[in-house]
Structures are given as structure tokens and as C-alpha cells.
Image: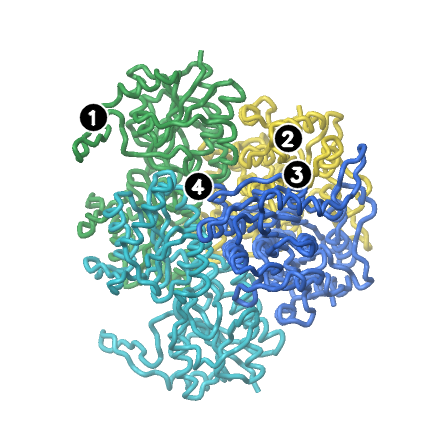
Chain colours: A blue, B cyan, C green, D yellow
Amino acid sequence: MIKRIGVLTGGGDCPGLNAVLRAVVKTAIVKYGYEVIGFKDGFKGLVDNKFVKLELDDVSGLLDRGGTILGTSNKHNPFKFPVNVDGNTEYKDMSKRVLENLDMFGIDCMVFIGGDGTLTTARDLMKMGIKGIGVPKTIDNDLSGTDTTFGFMTAVYTATEAIDKLHSTAESHHRVMILEVMGRYAGWIALEAGISGGADVILIPEIPYDINKVAQKVMERKNRGKSFSIIVVAEGAKDVEGDMVVNKVVEDSPDPIRLGGVGNKIAAEIERITGIESRVTVLGHLQRGGTPVPYDRILSTRYGVHAVELINQGKFGMMVSLKGNRITEVPIEEAVGTLKTVDPDGELVKIAKSLGVGFGD
Amino acid sequence: MIKRIGVLTGGGDCPGLNAVLRAVVKTAIVKYGYEVIGFKDGFKGLVDNKFVKLELDDVSGLLDRGGTILGTSNKHNPFKFPVNVDGNTEYKDMSKRVLENLDMFGIDCMVFIGGDGTLTTARDLMKMGIKGIGVPKTIDNDLSGTDTTFGFMTAVYTATEAIDKLHSTAESHHRVMILEVMGRYAGWIALEAGISGGADVILIPEIPYDINKVAQKVMERKNRGKSFSIIVVAEGAKDVEGDMVVNKVVEDSPDPIRLGGVGNKIAAEIERITGIESRVTVLGHLQRGGTPVPYDRILSTRYGVHAVELINQGKFGMMVSLKGNRITEVPIEEAVGTLKTVDPDGELVKIAKSLGVGFGD
Amino acid sequence: MIKRIGVLTGGGDCPGLNAVLRAVVKTAIVKYGYEVIGFKDGFKGLVDNKFVKLELDDVSGLLDRGGTILGTSNKHNPFKFPVNVDGNTEYKDMSKRVLENLDMFGIDCMVFIGGDGTLTTARDLMKMGIKGIGVPKTIDNDLSGTDTTFGFMTAVYTATEAIDKLHSTAESHHRVMILEVMGRYAGWIALEAGISGGADVILIPEIPYDINKVAQKVMERKNRGKSFSIIVVAEGAKDVEGDMVVNKVVEDSPDPIRLGGVGNKIAAEIERITGIESRVTVLGHLQRGGTPVPYDRILSTRYGVHAVELINQGKFGMMVSLKGNRITEVPIEEAVGTLKTVDPDGELVKIAKSLGVGFGD
Amino acid sequence: MIKRIGVLTGGGDCPGLNAVLRAVVKTAIVKYGYEVIGFKDGFKGLVDNKFVKLELDDVSGLLDRGGTILGTSNKHNPFKFPVNVDGNTEYKDMSKRVLENLDMFGIDCMVFIGGDGTLTTARDLMKMGIKGIGVPKTIDNDLSGTDTTFGFMTAVYTATEAIDKLHSTAESHHRVMILEVMGRYAGWIALEAGISGGADVILIPEIPYDINKVAQKVMERKNRGKSFSIIVVAEGAKDVEGDMVVNKVVEDSPDPIRLGGVGNKIAAEIERITGIESRVTVLGHLQRGGTPVPYDRILSTRYGVHAVELINQGKFGMMVSLKGNRITEVPIEEAVGTLKTVDPDGELVKIAKSLGVGFGD
């Protein structure tokens, strides 16, 4: 018999986290009469016992707010928890502390909202006896076990708006404009935003690119009277040599990948090969922020409500999931560990190629 | 062997029509070497022989433009075509003229982009021997045979933004704000925008409402310290008496439903019952306009490309369709004539009810 | 020596009210060490002693939120205050109560944020001895004594977006689309949004229109091959006969002007004269809502800071004001009672006419 | 007697250029019956005789389109014009060619739309006898002789939206988020967007910053329980040592300033001093793109109309200008050569300081 549930948000922030929290709290309190405890800053709050009781008023007005009111962290795995020992950081297994804390505060089960890392940790805690439900979160949309995750569509929206904006400069200045978007291992944002924004070239990790073929596409356009081109590139795109770009000269900076990322490499090479001015924009953190688009608000809400329904049905160890148009659930075990990447021969890539989009292959 | 294809857009305009046209033209010309002829103003152009050859340059920059460059009409059914006879409008069967025209200009097959009306007409023309492919369009998302149609998500976006805006006035003035959205027979826009915008009450044609229960929900909120409420109502919502509202005193105006619509009726009744100031906003044509959101741009593009693929495969008589995440096709015959309405016991309604949303039932 | 200041927001809500409150509270507390008391729902809170102490945390995150956290009312003039007497509403002079309340709670002076009505009342209270500063607020931008008021630019933005959206439908359907915007006595929103959105006809209260000249402009466009027209009309526009439109058949509805407003009258007449389909959209409350645009956030902030500076300088009886690019102040006395209307021979009207825009004159 | 006027757009692109072109063409043709010739890619088209006749249809629909349909260039000064000589670029004085071209095509006068560089060149051409009118353009708003230039407000809007988006990530992750915006010599965008977005620190070229004072502001906030901070920095901000940051390791890249700009330097230093995670976003080209906001559409339109009025009045050598709310004109001579920078003791900086914003001074 469930009386009190806990909830946390882990990993990078994502539009829709607050909407999930709102749906969890409203459904838990109004429909089932559960109490809800929110842990602060992901697993950190679970180890350090930083939490807050969540009431209806706390989630009022959250639907359209980006970020997470609980805070989040991607550095506090309870199995390798950073502990300050004589001024140095050591990593210790604090997982038993988590169990003790949940027991002490009478928390019957947890809702873990997070990506592959958070859900893997959640699974390992569940093996120790914690009851839990997973809610998938990844801005990159690369989680197995669900068709879509919230936040992704907002990121596609932000990236599409950026392409729309770059278009006018590209055309006015006869330039190649390159937009570098998120996607370290999977190119979903680049692919969908590229189609949505009418990009001429889309480069993704799943399809290694030959820079000469990219340049050729740009020149083909020029020869047809189109003096500009738009290239969308996922941060994890790699050329046919197989190496992902990490610009060594700046790697000791706080943000190494962004600084000397693949977008800059491509710009330099395209300009060298074609002689056409090329400029890069790195979209970066803007993709994570802002109010979620309606698609994500609805998906987040469905996830949050369904997570509480699963608790009510006692279906622990499951992750809520979207399959086609239907909200369902899959074992967390099946959802973690494998990335969902773009199929180079799949429909979306074919669609783009039918329109003449180049992938550098 | 296909050489020249025709295309037309029929019925009310919808964000994404131009994106479909762009995808059809690009795929047809670049991938298959077809010529593309665009007929003007729906079936009117097909009868009156008003057309334009569509080249790649004509569809450049169309992805983010609302409306349709071909123009559209919802009054020119070739089987009952309005003809001016001595100053009076008579309706004649001009369907043979359509066949003659297509024959005369060497058009091998047609792409019909439209809703239930347009596709029913298309089906009837196909029975006379025309080869055709259907592309489903309905802002209300009420077409059978496909999970989603383009333009719908943009309308949900526009309606959600409107709810977000009404929120601040509702709260500042302690009012009931009512937003009337499209949906004469199906409440999809009201339902999804209502969930997405955090409405307190959602009224749709599929669930007849009892105004006293609506008022009761408003008063419950007031008693909990929430001095305002947001109601989203589909234009076709009807009360438990079963009559759709048509305000008779203004029915000879150019826009009768909008003027004295259900939103106004509800506002008057809520204000009378609860004593709380109630205000209506009728979103109207704003829902059809503007640049399509990325979801719709991508869906439109997939539809347009797939329509040409079906032509290439000789699969005439089919309508492109989204099933889950997959683009496929269904016989037009199966897609027309039946509306896809909201299931009052379906998941989305349940989700909303779990959050405490009232439906007046 | 000032220790405690009060603040209220009166009249219709407007984007930027919260930004003013934030600036007042931050400047008062951080820079001058004043305490700030916020009265609820305009003058109602001042009579009924409903207030809240405003701390820095209360105004955190307010910059981009529409509405007013204090609530507002346009029905509670302390000189004619509605009082329930045996179930009937009677109006009594409660102005002395206001003085007693301010005295009782040690409020040294007030910041009155509101339009002509609110500031007139404020002036009358000041004649009784209350020290006060005015902050001008009018979505219509029709207040004398200042070049611009916050919220107006946000309304122009919303109306421009609406015109952009109506454009695609107008063009696709070959229709006349009419957008009715706010402006009962002054046509600023219609004029600026009309220029910004590229309207073909702009109708404002300051320039009585001849419907035949409006129809003529529509026909001129049609004859030049432009099959559609966009008309922006202020709600207070009147024809050369001189009567403002109030549709009598619906005047007992909760929202009489909106229902049978001037937009509908014009649509009916244009359709009758030209034979071209005409459709109306009434923008209504959407103009008041939503997050303020940067222009308004900055102006609100400047107003709020300057109001507190005036308190510090002891310049009571003044209203903050924008003159050109400079924030300054004018006596409230001079600012109220006279509307700032559009000059029919002024630069903006001339600009529009140079572009071929019709005003129906 | 003027019969034919020429127009060109020079320098970096800017939202509103097309709106100016539309206003020039409409006013010239409809009101005065002039012919309009548009030169391509700034002064390049004037030397190379690349031009197009502009008709009403060419400027239809331009009001809301970013960029410039004429194209632009910031590398083609006719006095030092790049010429290919045996495969090498040499710079020659081609100014006489300009005069010959204008004479040959019967162009009576020119409208030069551009920034300090373009207008300086225009002035020098006028000294040789060309009649011309200037229209000021600078995204940075740093041109003397006018209060505001079009495009600037759109850039402030884009930067404010970016701050709004970074807010949620900053708060959720307890980070310092740094937004680097345009402004090499003047900090107007950083200042106005910083106030509008509620930044905690604003760093501009006009106020050299001490990084320790910036860090101190961040720590003050942390000590007050605000675990995050937002810093907006103009690309030209410099520390008290006086050197603008140019990261040498990447200076041979296509986009040196952007790569190793001041934002990255500040992030590294703040993280080092405070120990708080700091992240940079470089807004870059996104500020130049997209549809102009209504403020800029109106200002562009007023500029364009007034430029043609000045031609009609024979007031050559003047630049259109906004003074307060009034469109007027100033001698081009007075407008070029001096930058309009932020006054460190001016009202806007004081406003920001009253709210507690730090400037690192």
C-alpha cells in the first residue's frame, strides 16, 4: 500500500521536466491521495537528504516553465559519489545511504526522471530493493525503449528557428552558414531540424561524411544559381576517417567541444575547398532552454500521469514509453544501455535525400 | 509511364500546404524527372483550366510559408459546379470537362491535397478513370485513415499560446476566460491545446456538457483560493440538451457561428450562475495562418515525398497516411466519409481528468 | 523621511505591470532601504485593507510575466465605492477610509500604476493629502503626458503577428480579412500594427471612414491582380455618419461590443459592395496577455526605477513619463483628462498613405 | 528633375533592410512616379554594373523578410576595389567607373543604405558629384546622427529570448551562464538585452571590467541563496588591463573572434575564481537574422519613405534620422566617423545599477 512517493530529476535539463513533475504531483495527490517528496539536484539529494514536500501549489504554473524546480545534476552517481576527503574529491559507494534515507522517511517508491545514466543508476538501486518507475528524458531522443522523449521537439523547434534566421544572412551575403546542434551519438536533432528548416546538407554521427562531397553539394548549388548553402551538423558528426573532432588547442577550456567543434572544422574546410565564405553558429545551451512546445507539454503530462498509474498498479521496474501514439511501459532493463540512432537507410534519411539534401556520403 | 503530374489544393487553407507542394515538386522533378502542373483554386482550376507549370524555383522558400501558392476553394465541386446563367448561379456537372482537360494537357495523374470534401470528390473523379493520389489535410485532425494531419499541430500551438496569454488576464482580474477554438465535429484542438495550456475545463463535441457542472468546477477552484478559471471550448461543443448553439439573431451576418457561438453562450451562463466576470476570445482564422511548426513541416514533407513515390509505384487510389511513426498509405475509399472523433473514454481524456480537468460531464 | 511605500495596479491589465512592480521593489529595498506594501486589486485593497508585504523574493522572475501579481480592478473607485447594502450594491465615498488605512499602517507614500481612471482617482486622493507618484499604463497608448506607455508595443507585436497569420489565408482564399484591434478612442494600435503588418486599409476613430472608399481600395487592388486585402480596424472606428457601432441585438450579452463590433459591420458591407468574401477576427483579450516584449520590459523597468527616485527626491504629485528617449516626470494633473489621439495629418498617417494604405477618407 | 533613382544595401545584413527597400520602391513609384534601380551586393554592383529594375511586385511581401533581396557586401569599396590581376587580388580606385555607370544608365540619384563604412564611401562619392541620400543601418546601434537604427531592436529581442532560455538551465544546474552578444565598440545590445532579460552582470566595451568584481557579484548572489547567475557580455568588452580578447591559438580559423572570444575567457576565469560551473553561449549570426520585430518594421518603413521625400525635396547629402519620436535628417558628414557609445554615467546604466546589476566596475 503506497502512501508516500519520491521523485527526482537527473542529468542535463530539458524542456518538459517541470511538466512531468506537475503531472506526477497532481495525479498522485488528487487522484490517489499519495504524498510526494521531491529530492533536490538528482541523486545528490537522495544521498544528502535534501528534499522538499511537493504540494499542489508548488506545481501550479509549471506547465510552461523550462528547467526543473528540483534542480538536477549529472555528477552524483550514488555508487560513485564524490566525497570531500581532506580537500580532495574521492568517489565512494553511497547506495546503502539511499536505502536508509528512503526507509527513514517512509518513501514507498521513487519516480526517476532522467536519461540513460540516471535510469541505469535507478535500475541498479532497484536491484538493491528500491521500488521505482522510470520516466525517459533525453534532448537527443536517443533512448531505446520509447519512440520519443520530451524536450526533443522543443530542441528541433529552436534549431529550426535558428536555420530560418541564418537563411537570410546566407542569402544576403552569399555564404555557407553552418549550424552545429546537439547530438553526440545520434543525429536526430540535426536530421529533423535539417528537414524542417530546409537545410542543403545534414551531417550526423550515423553517416560519416566526406568533406569533398559536402563541398561538391555546395558547388552544385552555386552552379545552379544558388549562391548560398545551409549545413546542419550534429556535434558528434565525424568524417570518413572516423575521428570525432576535438580541437586540441583549446581542450583545457571550460567547454572544449563547443569551442573547437566539428562545425568550425567543416567551415574551414568548405571555405578552403570552395572559396565561399563560411560561418558557424553553435546553438549549444539554447536548445535545452525555454518553454516547452505543446507537443512536449502534452507528452510530459502523459508520462507523468502514467508513471503514477504504474505505481498504483504496482508495476515497478518499468519505464513509461511512447509507442506510436500510445503511452505504455517497458522494463527499464530493456531501455538502458543501447542507443537509438538514426538508420542511414531509414525513411527520414530517404525523405531528405529525395529532396536533394546531401549527407556527405 | 508517367511524364506529367497535376496537383491541386482544396478546402480551407492550412499551415503546411506549401510544404507539401514543395516536396511534391522537388521529388517529382529531381528524383523522377516528372513535369508538375499546379491547378489554381482547387477544383475550380481543373474545370476552368487555370494552371501554372511548377518549377524548382517556384517552390524555393515555401517550407515555412503558410497558405497555398496555388490558392484554394471550398465551393467548386466539379460535380455541382457553380455556373453563371443569366446572372443566376446554377450548379452543373462539369466532371467530364475535368477529364477532357487532363487529357488535353497530357496530365497522367493527379495529387489531390485536401480534406474529406476534396478527397470524396477526388474518389468520384477516380471512378471516372482519373489516376490520383490523396494527401490528407484537416486542421481539425478529424480525418479517418491517418493518425495526424499537418496543420493541426500548428493550430494546437497557436491555441496554446492564446491560453498562455489569457492566463495572466484571468489571474489579474479574477475572471473566467473562455477560448473558443476550431472543431465543429471533433474536439482534438480543444483537447490537446487544453492539456498543453493547462485549461481547467475542456468542452468538446464528443462529450455533451452540463453547464451546471462547468460552473461547479469554477466554484470549486474559487473555494480552493483560485479566483480564476480557463475554459477551452470547441466551436462544435453542445450541451446535454443536444443542440449546437447557433445564435439566431445574427445568423444573417457574414460569419454567423463566430458571432453568436458557443463561447458566448457559456460565458453568459457561467457569469449568471457563478457571478464571476467571464470573457470570451474566439480564436478563429488565426488558427489557420502563419508558418507551420517544425512537426508540421516535417509531416508535410513526408506526405509530399511519399505521394510521388506512390505515383512512381503506380499505387493510384491511395491516400498517404501516418500510422504511429510510419508513413504509409490507405485506400482513399476507406479514409473518407467517417470522422475520427475523440474517444470520451480514451487515454487523452483520462489523462486530462487525472489532472483534475473538467469536461462538464 | 520615507520608510514605507505602498503600491497598487489599477484598471485593465497590461504586459509590463509586473516588471514595474519588480523595479519599484528592487530599487526601494536595495537602493533606499524602504519597505514596500502591495495593495491587492487596485483601490479595492486600499479600501478593504487587503495587502501584502513585498520582498525581493516576491518579485524574482517577474520581468517576463504578463499580468500583475497584485491583481487589479477597474470597478473600485474609492470615491464611489460599491458597497453591499441589504443585497443591493450602493456606491459610497470611502476615500477617508483610504487615508485612515494608510495612516494606520504607516505608509508614507503611494505608487499608483494605472491609466486615466486610476490616475484621476490618485490625483483626487492626493488633494486630500496623500503623497503619491503616478506610473502611466494604457494598452491603447492614449495617455497624455508621455510619449509611450508599456504594454502598447507588446499589443502592436501581437496584432502584427495576427496580421502576418491572416495574410496567408487572405491570399489563399482571395478574401478580405479584417482584424479588429483595441483602441476605443485612439487608433494607435491599429495604425502601428497596420503599418508593421502591411495592411491595405487602416480604420481609426480619428479618421471617420466612408465604406465606399474602403470598398474602392479593395477593388483597386483586385483590378491590379491582388485578389485579397487586409483591413485593420480599431474597435472605436466610426463611419462618416459619426455613430460608433453597437450591435443592438446582442447588447445584453456579457461582451456586447466585441460581439457585434465594427469589424463585423465592415465585413458585411464590404462583402455586399464588392462581392468578395470577407472575414473578421476580433483580437480582443489576446492583446493584453503574454510576456512583454523587450521594449516594454525596459520601459517598465525605467518607469519603476524612476518612480522610486522621485519618491527619494520628494517630487510627489508627479507622473513618470517618457519624452523622446528620456525618462522624466510631469504633474499628474497635466497628464489626466485629455486623450492623446492620432493626428490625421501627422507623420505616421502620412507614411502609411505614401505606401498606398487607405484610411477610408 | 528626378526620373530614375538607384538604391543599394551595404555592410552586414540586418533585419529591416528589405522593409526599407519596400518603402523606397513603393513611395518612389506610386507617389512620385520615379523608376527604381537596385544595385546588387552593395558597391560591387555599382562598379560591376550588376543591377535589377525594381517594380512594385518585387517588393511585395518583403516587410517581414530578413536580409536584403539586393544582396550585400562589406568588401567592395569602390575607392579600393578588389580586382583580380594575374590571379592575385589588387585594390584599385574604381570610383570614376561608378560615375560613368550612373551616367550611362541615367540614374539621377542614389539611396545608400548602410553603416559607417557604407555611408563614408557614399559621402566620398558625393564629393565627386553623385547625388545621394543615406539611410543608417547598424545592428549595434552605434551610429552617430540618429537615436536608433533598425535591426537593433530585433537583435535585442533575439538576445532577450536567449537569456530567457539560459535562465532555466542556469537555475536547474546552479551554473553561471554567459551570453556573448554583438557589440565590438558599443555595448547597446548587451545593455538593453541585459536589462530586458534580467541579467545579473552586464559587461560592455565602455566600462572596462575587473573580473574579481564580476566574481564577487556571483558569490554575493550565491550567499543570498541564488545559486546561479546570468552574465551578458558584448563581444568587445575588455578588462581593466585594456586589451580586447583575441584568442591567438585559433586566430587562423575562419571566425577567430567568435571562437576564442571574451565570453570563453570570462567563463574560465569565473569558474576558476568561484568554483561554480560556467558555460558560454555565443549568439553570433542569430542576431542578424529573422523577421524584423514591429518596431523595426515601422522604423525601416519611415526611413524608406523619408529618404524618397528628401529626394523629392532635393535635400541631397543628408541621412534620414530618428530624433526622439520624429523622423528628420542630418548631413551625412556629421553622421559618419564618430561612434555613438554607451555613456557609463547615463540613465540606462544607472537604471541597471539601481536594480543591482553589476558592470564589473
- The location of residue B110, given as percent across then percent down, is 48, 79
Q: Is residue A130 left or right of residue C138?
A: right
Q: Is residue C298 left or right of residue B337?
A: right
Q: Mark 3 or mark 2: name the one nearer the start of the chain.
A: 3
- Chain where mark 2 sits: D
Label 2 in the same subunit as label 4: no
Q: CA distance from mark 4 to mark 3?
A: 31 Å
Q: Which residue is mark 4?
A: C154
Task: Give the numbered dot on residue D222.
Answer: 2
Q: Amino acid at mark 2?
A: Lys
- Chain where mark 4 sits: C
The crowd level at tag 4 (other Cα within 10 Å; few <14, some 14-19, many 20+) is many
Seen from the viewer's position, the closer of residues A188 and B301 is: A188
Q: CA distance from mark 1 to mark 2?
A: 51 Å
Q: CA distance from mark 3 to mark 2?
A: 10 Å
Q: Which residue is mark 3?
A: D175
Task: Give the numbered dot on residue C92.
Answer: 1
Q: Secondary structure at mark 4?
A: helix
Seen from the viewer's position, the closer of residues A192 and D255 is: A192
- The location of residue B260, given as percent across then percent down, is 25, 56
